[in-house]
Amino acid sequence: MGEVPAKTAETATRLARLGPLSLRTRISLLLTAVAACLTLALGALWLQATRTSIDEEITAGTRVCEQWLTVLAREQDAAPGAAAAEQLLVRVRAAGRIRANALRAFDSAGRLLYVSPAPLYKAGRDAPPWFASLLDPHVQPRRIAAGALTLVLTPDPSRASVDAWDSAQAMVRWAVALLALLFLSTRLLLDRALAPLEQIRAALERTGRGRHDLRLPVYAARELNLLAHAYNGMADRLDQAVNDNVRLYSECELAQLMQARVERERRGIARELHDELAQGITAVRALAGAIVQRTADQAPLHGHAQSIIAVTNDIQQGIRHILRQLQPPSGGAQDLGAALQRHLALWHRHYPQLDLQVESDGDCLQVDDTVALALLRVLQEGLTNVARHAGAARVRVSLRLCRQPDGDWLELTLADDGRGLPPAAARRHGFGLRGMHERVLALKGELTIENQPGQGVRLCARLPAQGATLGQNG
C-alpha cells in the first residue's frame, strides 16, 4: 500500500518539472476532450443500435429455425418409430449449423445424440467477454419435442459480436486518428492565430526596460487589435511622460544654475557695496565732521556740514538694509519663524501705512537653509510688489507646515486687498516674478499667483519641507 502514494508523488514531481501547459495546448486539449466526449456518446448510440440489430437478427433467425424444426417434428409425430427418428437426425445433420443457432438432439432418456458443428465464419475468434455481454440479446433456448427426440435450439450471437468487435476496433482507430489530427490542427491554427502574443510580450518587456519607441501593428483578430491599440496608447502616454520629466528635470537644473548665479551676484554686489560705497560714505562723513569742527563760527557752512553727516547716516542705514537683503542666511538649519519676523518688522518700518497681519505655525520653525532662503526671497519680492504696485491697505502673511500623504510641505501665502493683477495682455513679466518661479521650481515646489475677485492678489508658494521641525520658544 505504501508504493501507491510514492508513485503518485513521483508523477506529480514529473508534471511539475514539465511546467504549466501553455494556453494553446490547453485549448487544444479542451477541444479534443469535447470531441472525444461526443465520440463516446456516438459510440454509445452505435452500441445500442448494434445490440438492437443483433437482437432482431438472432430473434428472427431463431424463429425461422424453430418453425422449420416444428414442421419436422410434426412429420415425426405423423410417422412414429425409430426409423422416423433416425430420418429426422439425418435431415438435421445434413442441415449443419442452422443460422446463428446451436442445435442439440436428446433421446427420451436424456442422452445427447447430436450437436451441431461449430461455426466456420471467423472460426477461432471471439469478442472479449465484457463486449459480448454488452451485445448479448439474451434470447432463451427453445425446446421442440419430436416424438422420442427432444431438439434444443440455442441462439448463438457470438459471430455477430465478433463482427461488431471488429467494427468497434476500426472505429476506435479512426476516432483516435481523427482526435489526434484535431489536436494537432487546432494547435497549429492557434499557434498561427496567437503568434502576435509573442510580439506583444516582447513589446511589454521592452517597455519594462524603459524603451517606449516600439509600436504594435494592426492585427486581423479584433481582440488582439484591441490589445495592440491599448499598448500603443500606453506607450504614447509613457513616452510623453518621460519627455515631460526630462524637460522638467532640465528646467530644474537650469533654474538651480540660474539661482546659484543670482546668489553669487548678490554676494558680489554686497561685497562691492560694503567695500567701496561704505568706505566712500565713511570718508565723506569724516570730512563733513572735520568741516563741522572748523566752522563753528560760520553758521551757514556749519549747518550744511551737519546735514551732510545726517544724510550719510541715512545712507549707511540704507546700505545696511540692502546688505541684509542681499546676504543669504548662514549654512545649516534656519529658524524660519524668527527670520520671517525680523524681515516683516524691518519691512513694516519702511511701510508703516500698510496693515500687516501675520499668521505662523509656531515661533521656532527649523528648516533647511536652502528652503529658508527661497521662502525669504519669495516673501521679499512679494511684499515689494505689494508696496509698489498693489495700492493695498492691508496685507496678510501666512506660513504653515502642512503634513500630507505625499510628504511635508511649507506653505507661504501673501494676500492683499489691492487692485489685483492687470489683464494678461498688459501684464509685464518682470525679473522679480521670474526669479520667484525659478527659485520655487529649483526646489521642486509650486508657485501660484491669482486674482481674488474684489480682494486683490493671492500669492502661494509651496516647498518641500526638507527636515523641518516645529516647536515653541520657551
Image (cartoon, rainbow, N blue to C red):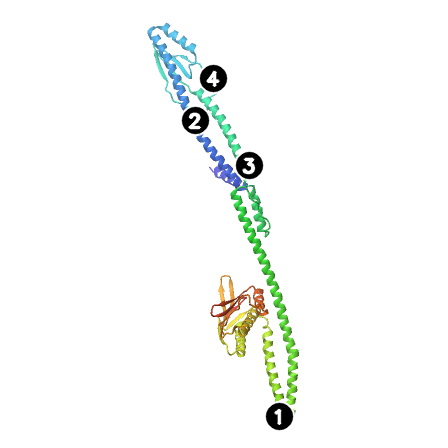
**Which amino acid, by three-letter code, is at mark 3?**
Leu
Above or below 124: residue 295 = below
The picture places residue 446, in percent across and down from the top left corner, at 54, 64
Contact between marks 4 and 1 (CB within 8 A): the answer is no
Q: Which residue appears at 44% of the width and 21% of the height? A: 160
Going by the picture, which residue comes out furthest to the bottom? 297
Which of pointers 3 and 1 lies earlier in the amino acid sequence? 3
Residue at image point 59% right, 76% down: 324
Q: Earlier in the sequence, mark 4 or mark 1?
A: 4
**Disc 3 packing (10 Å; few <14; some 14–19; many ≥20):** some
Closest to the observer: 206 or 288?
Answer: 288
Task: Classify mark 4: residues with Cα within 10 Å, few (<14), some (14-19) or many (20+).
Answer: few
Q: Amino acid at mark 4?
A: Tyr
Q: Which residue is mark 3?
A: 188
Q: Which residue is mark 1?
A: 299
Evaluate whether residue 273 shows in this view: yes
In 3D space, how far apart are the residues under numbered discs 4 and 2 (Cα atoms)? 22 Å
Q: Position of residue 315 (x, y in %)?
A: 61, 81
Question: Which is closer to the viewer, label 4 or label 1?
Answer: 1
| Quarter of the rendering containing residue 217 | top right
Instruction: Identify the residue position indicated by label 2 in the image.
Output: 47
> Mark 2 or 3 closer to N-term?
2
Quarter-of-image position of residue 88: top left
Q: The disc labelled 2 sits on which kind of residue?
A: Leu
Which mark identifies residue 121? 4
- CA separation, marks 3 and 4? 46 Å
Callout 1, which amino acid?
Ala
- Nearest to viewer (mark 3 / mark 4): 3
